[in-house]
Amino acid sequence: ITPAITGWPELYQKNGVLKSYDTSLYAHRNHKDCLLIECGQHKESKASVVAKKAIKNILRYYKMITVPEFSVSMGKPLELIQMSKLYIKENKKDVFIKTFKHLQPLQRGQVIAKRSSGELITAQGNMIMILPKSHALLGKEWFYLGMRNKD
């Protein structure tokens, strides 16, 4: 199963704290379809190879180019994950309770993090951890939570 995370523009639009100025927000504001593909960490050597393959496969899928050496695999179904919450690192003493991985399932009531005030952040349902940043900068994205789309 390949995860497809939806709802980025809507999440940033309703959070009111941080603004996203990426390509997907531009497309959203102009009523256009948009696809953002994560191809790896910026410094990861294979990221550019993954990106080139993804671009060629998309162009081939839409019959915009013919590239026989690249194939489009439609064998993996997409698992839609709807973004539901963005957490901002408010204090240097805001900490995760443990190390979390991207796309790690979380159970309802599971403690995720502790704010410097002592407030515990818990999963409000069976959720998915998205892009946890243990060394997030103050005032920036710390982690996101999402839910599997049952559609």
Image (cartoon, rainbow, N blue to C red):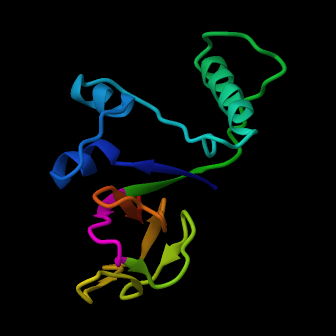
Of residue 39 and residue 128, the one placed in the foreground of this image is: 39
Q: Where are the magenta residues, as a range?
A: 83-94
Q: Is residue 111 magenta?
A: no
**Magenta includes 85?**
yes
Q: Is residue 39 left or right of residue 135?
A: right
The quadrant of the picture occupied by the C terminus is: bottom left
Image quadrant in which you'd find residue 112? bottom left
Q: Is residue 68 left or right of residue 87?
A: right
Asked whether, in this view, residue 25 is left or right of residue 50, the answer is left
Where 7 sits versus 50, above or below?
A: below
Give me the residue at 44% from left, 57% from top.
81
The location of residue 106, given as percent across then percent down, is: 47, 78
Q: Residue at image x 33%, y 55%?
A: 140
Please provide percent x and percent y for residue 40: 63, 44
Farthest right residue in view:
69
Residue at image point 26% right, 68% down = 90
Q: Residue 80: horizontal and vertical position, in percent?
A: 47, 53
Q: Which of these two is toward me, 73 or 145? A: 145
Q: Position of residue 99 (x, y in %)?
A: 55, 77
Q: Residue at x 56, y 41 (%)?
A: 38
Residue 82 lies left or right of residue 2; in this view the side is left
Residue that sits furthest to the top in the current view: 65
Q: Could you tell me which quadrant the N terminus lies in?
A: bottom right
Q: Quadrant of residue 64?
A: top right
